[in-house]
């Protein structure tokens, strides 16, 4: 049960961060898109290794 609560909290914090940034007009849509699509600032993609 605590894992579900932690996951819900993590997702909620992420959503709240995006909502507040958009609300105060500080959201960088291009950077958000790059981060969510795993693109580096230089335009290259980086592999995620485990």
Image (tube, rainbow, N blue to C red):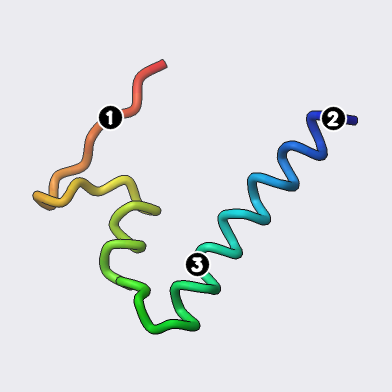
Percent x, y of residue 40: 20, 46
If you read the primary sequence from the N terminus, does the residue marked by circle 2 or circle 1 appear first? 2
| Disc 3 secondary structure class | helix
| Disc 2 secondary structure class | helix
Instruction: Kindly report the distance in space between the C-alpha atoms of the residues bearing marks 3 and 2.
Output: 25 Å
- Residue under circle 1? 47
Q: Is residue 25 left or right of residue 3?
A: left
Residue 1: quarter of image: top right
Instruction: Kindly report the distance in space between the C-alpha atoms of the residues bearing marks 2 and 1.
Output: 31 Å
- Residue ID at (61%, 54%): 13
- Residue under circle 2? 2
- Residue ID at (9%, 49%): 42
Question: Dot 3, crowdedness within 10 Å: few (<14), some or many (≥20)?
Answer: some
Question: Dot 1, crowdedness within 10 Å: few (<14), some or many (≥20)?
Answer: few
- Residue ID at (15%, 51%): 41
Percent x, y of residue 24: 44, 82
Question: Dot 2, crowdedness within 10 Å: few (<14), some or many (≥20)?
Answer: few
Instruction: Kindly report the distance in space between the C-alpha atoms of the residues bearing marks 1 and 3.
Output: 25 Å
Q: Is residue 48 left or right of residue 17?
A: left
| Disc 1 secondary structure class | loop
Give the label, 2 or 1, closer to the camera.
2
Residue 18's disc number: 3
Q: Is the residue 43 above or below the residue 30 in the image?
A: above
């Amino acid at each position: 049960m605590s894992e579900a609560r932690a996951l819900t909290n993590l997702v909620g914090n992420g959503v709240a961060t995006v909502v507040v940034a958009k609300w105060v007009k500080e959201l960088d849509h291009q950077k958000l898109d790059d981060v969510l699509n795993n693109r580096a600032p230089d335009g290259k993609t980086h592999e995620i290794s485990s």
